[in-house]
Image (cartoon, helix red, strand yellow):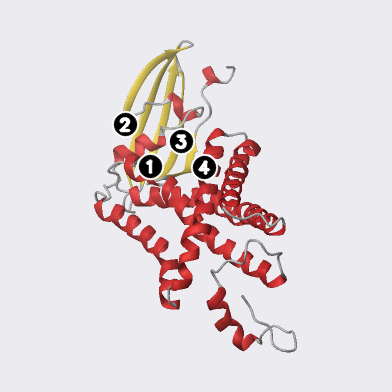
Amino acid sequence: MFVCGGNGQFPSKNNYIFILKDYYFSSFSWGDLLTQSDLRQMLVRKLVVAYFTSWAIVLWVSFPNIVLGGANWNAAGNYMSWVFMIALYAVPTIFLYGSLVSSLLEAAAARLKVKGPGEVLVSGLLHVAFGFCCGFVLQSSLFSIMGGVAAILFFCCDRIIVRAIPSLKIKARLISFTVPVLLFVLIAGAIYATSPPKPPFTAKDAVQFATSGNGTTIDRFPKEEGQVKLKIGGYDVERETKVEETARKETYNVVFTERWHKGEENGQYQMIYEVNRGSMGAKGGNGAEPPYLQFK
């Protein structure tokens, strides 16, 4: 806790950081009323607890992705994306909602002079109850469970882990902040190191990617390179899927061609797409839409 000078003022900025490290993780007396320095001290501590709780939730929820992710060449990228999505929801919720609720509960306990085992039990149950409320707001039982678990972690971290840090030296305290980051880097690095090498993107892959969608004109054409002949509305129709290599590595032109004739009437319709790993763009085309499709 800060000690004011004889003039009742807080220490100067030059001495602030040295005093901060001595009270950073300590807790004020639960039975006393909150003073201004108690409030500042509590809020700093809640932010520290939110930091560790956020990492715990992110690493815990992302664990199934490690187990069920499979031996995929981009398993590390998938894991990183999953961690980012979890953090996008968990971190703001824990830092804003979790810190606010926990601070209000602690302030209420101090002002009402509630202490002892009863205070721990009631405060813990209220933390869990407010954690479950996240799921009620989002109308999701899964978020309720995650909110409840996060609340338990937050409460335990506040009461046990953070309270043990004052006995550590400043260097050890800083190291404790880096442990979750190092653990995350270790997990991501292990996934990357054990993933199989990136396979080449072949012409067959290009055709498969180009024809993988639904509800487009491409649906009419063969899903593999080749031709199919049909009879539609008296027209003899030939639809062809063809792939051509380009000058760029692992980039192909997938050409969809539809030819038709009926007596002396004939025509051709063509679409060309440039395809590489994970992306496809229209490159051109020619011809008019087949007459037997114009009135469908």
Looking at the picture, does residue 67 appear above or below residue 153? above
- Circle 3 packing at 10 Å, graded few (<14), some (14-19), many (20+), is some
In this view, the mark in front (2 or 3)? 2
Identify the image quadrant of residue 8. bottom right
Which mark is nearer the camera, 2 or 1? 1
Residue 64's mark?
Answer: 1
- In three-dimensional space, the C-alpha distance between marks 4 and 1, rounded to whole angstroms, equals 14 Å
Q: Which mark sits nearer the N-terminus, 3 or 4?
A: 4
Residue 156 or residue 281, whichever sits in front: 156
Per the model, the C-alpha gap separating discs 4 and 2 is 48 Å
- For label 4, the residue is 146
- Marks 2 and 3, how far apart at CA: 14 Å
Residue type, mark 4 in image: Met
Q: Earlier in the sequence, mark 3 or mark 1?
A: 1
- Numbered label attached to residue 198: none
Amino acid type, residue under disc 1 in the picture: Pro
**Residue matched to label 2:** 225
| Element assignment for label 2 | loop
Percent position of residue 69, x then y? 34, 42
Name the spot of residue 22 as percent of width and height, x first. 53, 77
What label does residue 271 carry, if any?
A: 3
Which one is nearer the viewer's eye here, 109 or 225? 109
Give the secondary structure at mark 4: helix
